[in-house]
């Protein structure tokens, strides 16, 4: 049963470009909507590190990134049966699902549970996974590789922001 899910459903979902792009955007939007009250109260009261963008930037950037990662998954899925790179494409899709799961976990950890240290551990693992995925995509689909580059850059920046919030708000607390 697990093999059936793995081989058919997980490889078929991103083959449809509308689903591949729309699903991450919808799930990301849902994650943001669930934690909106925390953003307006708890997060607003936190000291921010230098270089903090305006709040409006986050939903715009994340919508674009979710769309890009979804389309990259679509491009990757188109290679799962390609000779010589099919195994690499399947492995990359597994990493893409894993990194999307870690991405979806960050928001409830940071905003829902108000645990920025746990969120930092999550985003550090996420960044490592995304860097590995990006490197792998270079040999699978050049366009997917390029779609992941802004994601790498933003995650590096988001990791800095997460760490900066910990430093500025929790450095003198036990």
Image: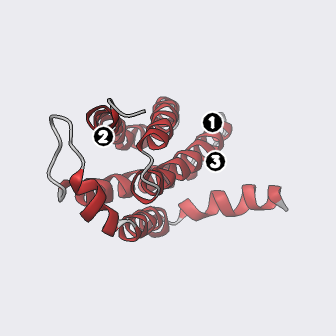
Side of 88 relative to 106 (left or right) = right
**Sequence-wise, which precedes: disc 1 or disc 3?**
3
Q: Mark 3 = which residue?
A: 80
In this view of the protein, which residue sits in the foreground, 137 or 52? Answer: 52
Side of 139 relative to 28 (left or right) = right
Q: Mark 2 = which residue?
A: 154
Q: Mark 1 = which residue?
A: 88
The percent coordinates of residue 68 (x first, y second) are 36, 52
Res 95 quadrant in image: top right
Task: Kindly identify the residue that appears in the image at 16 percent across and 46 percent down.
Answer: 53
The percent coordinates of residue 166 (x first, y second) are 34, 36
The percent coordinates of residue 34 (x first, y second) are 41, 70
Q: Nearer the viewer, mark 2 or mark 1?
A: 2
Q: Report crowding for label 1: few under 14, some 14 to 19, many 20 or more residues within 10 A (C-alpha).
A: some
Are the two marked residues, 2 and 1, in contact with CB atoms closer than 8 angstroms? no
Side of 22 relative to 101 (left or right) = left
Label 3 element class: loop
Label 2 element class: helix
Are the two marked residues, 1 and 3, in contact with CB atoms closer than 8 angstroms? no
């Amino acid at each position: 049963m697990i093999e059936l899910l793995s081989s058919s459903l997980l490889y078929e979902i991103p083959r449809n470009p509308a689903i591949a792009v729309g699903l991450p955007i919808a799930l990301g939007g849902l994650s943001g909507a669930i934690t909106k009250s925390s953003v307006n109260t708890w997060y607003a009261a936190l000291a921010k590190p230098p270089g903090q963008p305006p709040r409006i930037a986050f939903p715009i950037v994340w919508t674009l990134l979710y769309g890009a990662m979804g389309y990259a998954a679509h491009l990757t899925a188109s290679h799962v049966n390609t000779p010589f790179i099919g195994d690499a494409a399947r492995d990359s899709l597994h990493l893409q699902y894993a990194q999307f799961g870690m991405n979806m976990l960050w928001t409830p950890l940071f905003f829902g549970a108000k645990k920025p240290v746990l969120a930092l551990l999550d985003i550090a693992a996420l960044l490592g996974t995304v860097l590995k995925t990006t490197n792998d995509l270079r040999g699978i689909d050049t366009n997917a590789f390029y779609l992941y580059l802004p994601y790498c850059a933003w995650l590096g920046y988001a990791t800095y922001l997460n760490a900066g919030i910990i430093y500025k708000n929790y450095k003198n607390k036990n």
